[in-house]
Image (spheres, coloured by chain):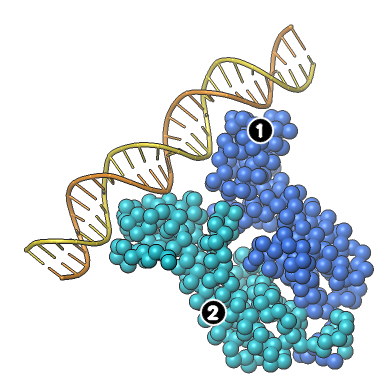
Chain colours: A cyan, B blue, C yellow, D orange
Amino acid sequence: MTERKKPVGQPDKRRAITAGALTLFARDGYTRAGLDAIAAEAGVSNRTIYNHFTDKAELFQAVMQESTQRVADTMVDIIDRHLTKIIDLESDLIDFGLAWLGVLTSDLAPHFALIRQINAEIEHIPPAALQLWQQTGPGRTRCELAERLRRIAERGVLTIDDPARAAGHLMLLISADNLTDRADLHNENALREMVAAGVSTFLYGYAKRTVVGGRDAADGA
Amino acid sequence: MTERKKPVGQPDKRRAITAGALTLFARDGYTRAGLDAIAAEAGVSNRTIYNHFTDKAELFQAVMQESTQRVADTMVDIIDRHLTKIIDLESDLIDFGLAWLGVLTSDLAPHFALIRQINAEIEHIPPAALQLWQQTGPGRTRCELAERLRRIAERGVLTIDDPARAAGHLMLLISADNLTDRADLHNENALREMVAAGVSTFLYGYAKRTVVGGRDAADGA
DNA sequence: TAATATTTGCACCGATCGTTGCAATCTTCC
DNA sequence: GGAAGATTGCAACGATCGGTGCAAATATTA
């Protein structure tokens, strides 16, 4: 049986702490972010943090878990909102992609800076904790997206053998240039074009096609 | 005119230092990697490091520049070796992808850990230095890959409007699952399947097609 | 109001780290 | 062999940081 830790301290203080910690962890990274700075950011005494969390490590884990949950919820919501009732698949996917990328510049932006911190120290993080995060975060959204794609394919518009992999491909294609050119994240036109290009490649890549021997089945006519 | 800094100290010591620094920066990150540890790893006195570099920051920059150059050279080499003479496009692309991913587990692996460090502190890095790295590193390989794809498309096998973007798509699709499941990097079968799936999506996505109105041009027949 | 839980400020410990100065030793090259 | 330069070990400084103990102050609840 897992020990049930009774919550100690006032909940609003705890929220303030995790919020401030998220800000500073995201901006400065785990090591650089000092507890004094976090306390200041949270409008809380240094000593109070240790009243809610035993460790800096435990604080980080709590922040991570909280943020992951919130972002995953948002992502799943976006998936449900754009990919349940499909009118025009291409424009729906583009809208979905834009909403998806919009999260990166929303108030949840710090989360992704946090992800980069995780990624940098990935060799030093206990695999169990890492897998737990992977599961409740990107894993969940990818699963949700895969399910939507499966249903769309089921209705005969796409050819998808492995929905999970297709979901991965779609997510990557949508945010393609993002990795090489972060400036475009705030350029509405470039953003739309990038997403449209990614969606286009995805749609052609998974277009319904007759199953015959070679690849020629798709580029024929 | 940019100041020419005359090299100080013995070149082999300098190489030993940058090599050791790469190892530790990659493993522990910029902040965690101590200069004493770096000195020990390099088989060199702490004090000697300050004879070659003024700062920890300058040392890091030198390491970064060196490593980026070497990896970019390797990448360009792989591109040239696999994508110059095309026999069977699909199998050539798969071989290319496997060689590409092979670099991630080669002796150049520390470089990518270093990249993750960069990515984590991306907000704290002077944009000029960042752009310089972007240009001589991934930018260069993407450019080279784009050129190869352009030539391939020119010979009528693919339809590529924007070679640079296509190159980006190909690179992402090849290493798709890599981001979600790092364990598969050492599983030969899973790796091959992942690359094959990515290449397949890419080939369908950019398959030669007759230019007509709708998307139906590709999924017909 | 009284009892209890929580927060706060402050001083402090121990450890790590970047950096420097210095004098001694070793290498390189003429 | 000797001069110039490079390397080394060592000690030390100043700063930062995680974490703790303690007693006073504040808020919560009965």
Give the labeled residue for mark 2. Answer: A76
| Residue B35: image location, x then y, percent | 57, 38
Q: Could you tell me which residue is drawn at 72 percent across and 83 percent down?
A: A160
Q: Secondary structure at mark 2?
A: helix
Give the labeled residue for mark 1. Answer: B43
Q: Chain of mark 2?
A: A
In the picture, residue A6 is in which quadrant? bottom left
Estimate the spatial distance between the alpha carbons at disc 2 and disc 1, rounded to whole Å: 52 Å
The dot on residue A207 is: none
Left or right? Give the position of B72 relative to D26. Answer: right
The quarter of the picture where the N terminus of chain B appears is: top right
| Residue B145: image location, x then y, percent | 80, 63
**How many labels sit on residues?**
2
Q: Tell me: residue B131, above or below residue B57.
A: below
Q: Secondary structure at mark 1?
A: loop
Q: Could you tell me which residue is drawn at 68 percent across and 50 percent down?
A: B110
| Residue B205: image location, x then y, percent | 78, 78
Q: Is residue B209 visible?
A: yes
Callout 2–callout 1 Cβ contact below 8 Å: no
Q: Chain of mark 1?
A: B
